[in-house]
Image (cartoon, rainbow, N blue to C red):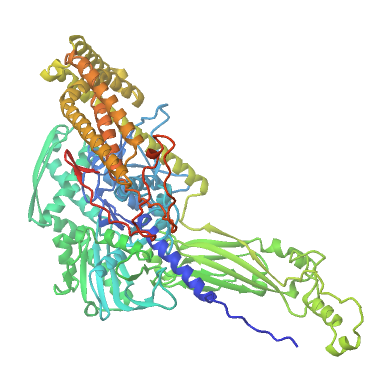
């Protein structure tokens, strides 16, 4: 009888080994990933763009624009073929309104259908921009002027391309600040190598069409963003510096340039699962929970609408005063209207703090100046007459109604956004029943969203060591799934987005053929969609019929169980797509053996498991049979045939067909847009480099004209050299002002620059050599003197060490080599000094600073290397225990001198203790030299 035993080894258990390996990997990742991670927040507003950056080693702050501003206007413009962004673009609107495009956010997701005619008219009223349809039936802008090389017509840009160009500019600013590039894939949940994650804020009420449009714009710009509602981002920023021992509810009222919205957010603290890569098991920690409960909004109550009202009022005042002097009506002059719109925005900001503002626009139209006054009372009358006053307060009531709360249930109402500072907006909130005690202004109204967006993105990366916050964004449009049989079910209810994936399970006949299902917004929110369609996507599951065709033809479908799992994903938040679709086919128990071999992709060599077990049982014998029949019959072995599999997983094809107003980019369209933006970015960089080279050349020409009259320059140069410089400067100035110079590319400009530099730099080199030669000579002569002293002292040290039978740092070869180098340098310097004395200041020098420094450095480095050597230990000769034989007379006079260290007769046989090392004494002429 065989007894099974276990042998204990000294190795740790397998679990402990795996745990140790995981900890080691986590430790390495936690250190290696620090320099390769970061999050950029982009608050893309209607009127302005703000960028923030959170990255280890970099202060968490807003990224500055080119002109050191904390925000930049959301505008892109073209001056001929030169593309401009930010302040430069917005300033160009008063000169070229037809080539300047602002507030592009208002057109994202909009179609060219009749349903969006009001949205298009609102946009066109700003600068008179010409809108045309794209091949996807979305909106595109057309420039007013044709600057194409072949005069093929004005350039056109889809709205997504305009936004992508602005994102590309924001990307450049963020990458320069971070020293790292954006990630090109969707941000992971545990952080990774390869660049910066990006989070873009969007209004909480944006539909899937609008969210798809801004995601497409980001993809054109070369990155995949997360999306977060501006209300959730402000909530995260609010939670950064606060604790919540008990649950609190706050309403964030954001009145901006594009709309007014109110978001109710609940803050609490609870234990959550630690998601750090260093956490083990069921580790939990306390985290602040930011939960978006509901939201209300109004698209008409906006800063843009107020700007338009003020502009029209100013236009009326101008026409009343100067209308009879105009050849063309003021409203038919785009430049004048653009200037009035800019002035209206300024007046609005002034009236936020003052009761009256002065209006002063020089040469508004046909060289006529416009001067007037505009009061806060006039503004409030205009807003009331337009029916906007109550619209600014309605989002608060809508949010409370959606959350089934009262004002008394709120801890505070926090004001956010630029329009929240306007007095009539605050008055509208009070008129709606909001007491002053509830109104708070305890966040940065301009930057809370962008700072919160970056922090929100960082919460998905456990490698960031920061305050634990879990934020759940809000869903204001319930999403309904409609099966092919007409059955409907809400898969994404209104409230918090706690899960972004929804898995559907189908079995039996439901999974036996291709099918489709539709998702749409619930009909209860149709009035809130603002002309956007409720239908979203049709998800089609195909290839099922192809895979099961053989089973159906042979009538074997009833011998298998079918299970299909379909995943619907909402990433980025508010957009919807179909994920993985898996069909699992399992053979039913008790089926015909081997009947499904062809479906499970198994050849004839396979056997059913029951057949194999039966064969093994037949060939088995008992122990008694084996004892009775202990003949030499060959033992029957187990069959080598492979067992028949009874399960097969098939990945099916899932397709998303847009319905309604959604018009996402196709792969081809997206590639073409990326190429177009890449070419534009490349041309812009080349243009910047060319302009910089042109400016440098122009500055060099002015400098060359002045430098020839400088006294120091004249002493170091010959008359013919100065004449050549003056002549070349005049020649280049004439060329730069010519047509050839205006259109010259970068290589030509650099060539002209080098022509001038080649004349000036040799003379400047003489001047610098003359100024620094004396100090360099002093350093070389000092090094040679120190080397002389070092060699002398080192030779003495070596002689004494040899005489005492001790080791020395130095060898004869080292000192001979150093002395030879010293003599060589002395000869070189003496010859050069003689030649240099014969030259004038306008001649090129013989003794150059670089050569003097090189030789001095080599001598000092050699001294340092020899001085820092360790003294080798000397092993004394072995002693013999027997008495030495009597000495014989030497055969030759020199024989005795060959024995330099005769063994001592007085020392005992044991080896003496080593003597302590003597401290090294510095050389009298060089304190750092060790001997």
Considering depth in this image, is 255 or 544 the residue closer to the camera?
544
Horizontal and vertical percent position of residue 693: 28, 28
Q: Is residue 48 shown above or below 639?
A: above
User: Is 880 on the left or on the right of 816, as rendered?
Assistant: right
Horizontal and vertical percent position of residue 597: 78, 67
Q: Which of the image's four quarters has the C terminus?
A: top left
Q: Outermost residue toward the bottom?
A: 624
Q: Which of the image's four quarters has the N terminus?
A: bottom right
- Regarding residue 530, the answer to whether it shows in the image is no
Horizontal and vertical percent position of residue 876: 37, 52
Counting every numbered tag in the picture gives 0
Q: Is residue 616 shown above or below 815?
A: below
User: Is 271 on the left or on the right of 503, as rendered?
Assistant: left
Q: Is residue 645 shown above or below 207?
A: below
Considering depth in this image, is 32 or 112 the residue closer to the camera?
32
Horizontal and vertical percent position of residue 271: 35, 79
Q: Is residue 321 shown above or below 873?
A: above
In which quarter of the view is residue 504 placed? bottom right
- Regarding residue 768, the answer to whether it shows in the image is yes
């Amino acid at each position: 009888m065989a007894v099974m035993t276990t042998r204990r080894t000294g190795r740790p258990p397998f679990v402990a080994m795996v745990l140790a390996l995981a900890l080691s990997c986590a430790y390495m990742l936690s250190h290696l990933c620090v320099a390769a991670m970061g999050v950029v927040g982009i608050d893309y507003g209607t009127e302005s763009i703000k960028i923030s950056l959170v990255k280890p080693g970099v202060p968490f702050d807003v990224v500055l624009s080119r002109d050191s501003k904390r925000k930049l206007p959301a505008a892109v413009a073209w001056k001929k073929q030169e593309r401009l962004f930010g302040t430069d673009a917005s300033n160009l609107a008063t000169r070229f309104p037809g080539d300047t495009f602002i507030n592009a956010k208002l057109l994202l997701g909009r179609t060219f259908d009749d349903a969006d005619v009001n949205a298009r008219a609102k946009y066109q009223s700003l600068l008179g921009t010409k809108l045309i349809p794209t091949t996807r039936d979305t909106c595109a802008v057309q420039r007013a002027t044709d600057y194409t090389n072949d005069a093929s017509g004005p350039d056109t840009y889809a709205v997504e391309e305009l936004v992508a160009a602005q994102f590309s500019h924001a990307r450049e600013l963020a990458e320069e600040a971070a020293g790292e590039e954006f990630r090109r894939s969707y941000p992971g949940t545990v952080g990774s190598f390869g660049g910066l994650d990006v989070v873009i804020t969007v209004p909480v009420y944006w539909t899937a069409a609008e969210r798809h449009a801004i995601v497409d714009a980001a993809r054109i710009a070369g990155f995949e963003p997360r999306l977060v509602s501006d209300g959730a981002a402000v909530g995260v920023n609010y939670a950064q510096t606060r604790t919540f021992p008990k649950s609190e509810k706050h309403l964030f009222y954001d009145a901006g340039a594009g709309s007014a919205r109110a978001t109710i957010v609940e803050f609490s603290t609870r234990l959550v699962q630690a998601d750090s890569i260093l956490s083990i098991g069921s580790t939990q920690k306390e985290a602040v929970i930011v939960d978006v409960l509901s939201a209300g909004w109004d698209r008409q109550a906006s800063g843009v609408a107020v700007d338009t009202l003020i502009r029209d009022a100013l236009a009326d005042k101008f026409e009343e005063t100067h209308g009879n002097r105009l050849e063309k009506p003021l409203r038919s002059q785009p430049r004048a209207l653009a200037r009035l719109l800019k002035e209206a925005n300024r007046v609005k900001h002034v009236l936020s703090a003052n009761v009256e503002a002065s209006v002063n626009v020089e040469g508004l139209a046909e060289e006529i100046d416009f001067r007037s006054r505009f009061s806060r009372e006039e503004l409030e009358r205009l807003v009331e007459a337009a029916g906007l006053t109550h619209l600014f307060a309605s989002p608060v009531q809508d949010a409370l109604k959606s959350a089934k709360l009262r004002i008394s249930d709120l801890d505070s109402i926090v004001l956010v956004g630029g329009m929240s500072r306007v007095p009539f907006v605050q008055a509208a909130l009070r008129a709606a029943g909001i007491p002053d005690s509830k109104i708070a202004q305890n966040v940065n109204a301009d930057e809370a969203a962008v700072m919160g967006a970056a922090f929100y993105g960082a919460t998905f990366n456990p490698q960031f060591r920061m305050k634990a916050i879990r934020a759940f964004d809000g869903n204001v449009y319930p999403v309904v799934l409609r099966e092919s049989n007409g059955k409907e079910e809400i898969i994404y209810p209104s409230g918090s987005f706690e899960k972004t994936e929804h898995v559907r399970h189908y079995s039996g006949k439901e999974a036996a053929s291709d099918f489709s299902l539709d998702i749409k917004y619930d009909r209860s929110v149709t009035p809130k969609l603002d002309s956007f369609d409720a239908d979203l996507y049709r998800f089609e599951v195909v290839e099922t019929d192809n895979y099961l065709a053989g089973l159906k033809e042979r009538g074997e479908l009833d011998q298998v169980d079918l299970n299909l799992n379909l995943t619907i994903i909402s990433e980025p938040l508010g957009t919807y797509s179909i994920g993985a679709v898996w069909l699992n086919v399992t053979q039913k128990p008790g089926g015909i053996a081997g009947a499904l071999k062809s479906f499970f992709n198994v050849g004839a060599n396979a056997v059913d498991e029951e057949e194999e077990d039966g064969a093994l049982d037949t060939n088995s014998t008992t122990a008694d049979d084996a004892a009775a029949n202990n003949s030499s019959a060959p033992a029957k072995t187990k069959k080598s045939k492979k067992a028949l599999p009874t399960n097969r997983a098939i990945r099916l094809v899932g397709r998303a067909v847009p319905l309604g107003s959604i018009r996402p980019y196709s792969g081809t369209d997206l590639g073409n847009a990326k190429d177009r933006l890449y070419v534009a970015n490349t041309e812009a960089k080349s243009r910047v480099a060319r302009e910089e080279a042109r400016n440098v050349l122009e500055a060099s020409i002015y400098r060359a004209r002045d430098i020839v009259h400088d006294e120091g320059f004249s002493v170091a140069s010959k008359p013919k050299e100065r004449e050549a410089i003056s002549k070349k400067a005049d020649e280049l100035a004439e060329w730069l002002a010519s047509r050839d110079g205006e259109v010259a590319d970068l290589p030509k400009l650099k060539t002209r620059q080098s022509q001038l530099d080649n004349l000036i730099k040799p003379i400047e080199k003489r001047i610098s050599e003359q100024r620094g030669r004396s100090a360099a000579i002093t350093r070389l002569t000092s090094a040679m003197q120190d080397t002389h002293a070092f060699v002398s002292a080192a030779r003495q040290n070596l002689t004494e060490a040899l005489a005492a039978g001790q080791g020395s740092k130095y060898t004869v070869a080292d000192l001979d080599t150093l002395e030879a180098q010293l003599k060589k340098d002395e000869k070189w310097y003496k010859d050069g000094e003689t030649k240099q004395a014969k030259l004038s200041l306008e001649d090129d020098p013989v003794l150059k600073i670089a050569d003097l420094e090189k030789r001095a450095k080599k001598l000092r480095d050699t001294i340092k290397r020899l001085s820092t050597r360790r003294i080798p230990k000397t092993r004394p000769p072995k002693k013999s225990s027997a008495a030495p034989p009597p000495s014989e007379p030497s055969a030759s006079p020199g024989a005795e001198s060959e024995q330099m260290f005769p063994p001592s007769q007085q020392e005992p046989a044991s080896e003496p203790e080593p003597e302590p090392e003597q401290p090294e004494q510095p050389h009298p002429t060089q304190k750092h030299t060790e001997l």
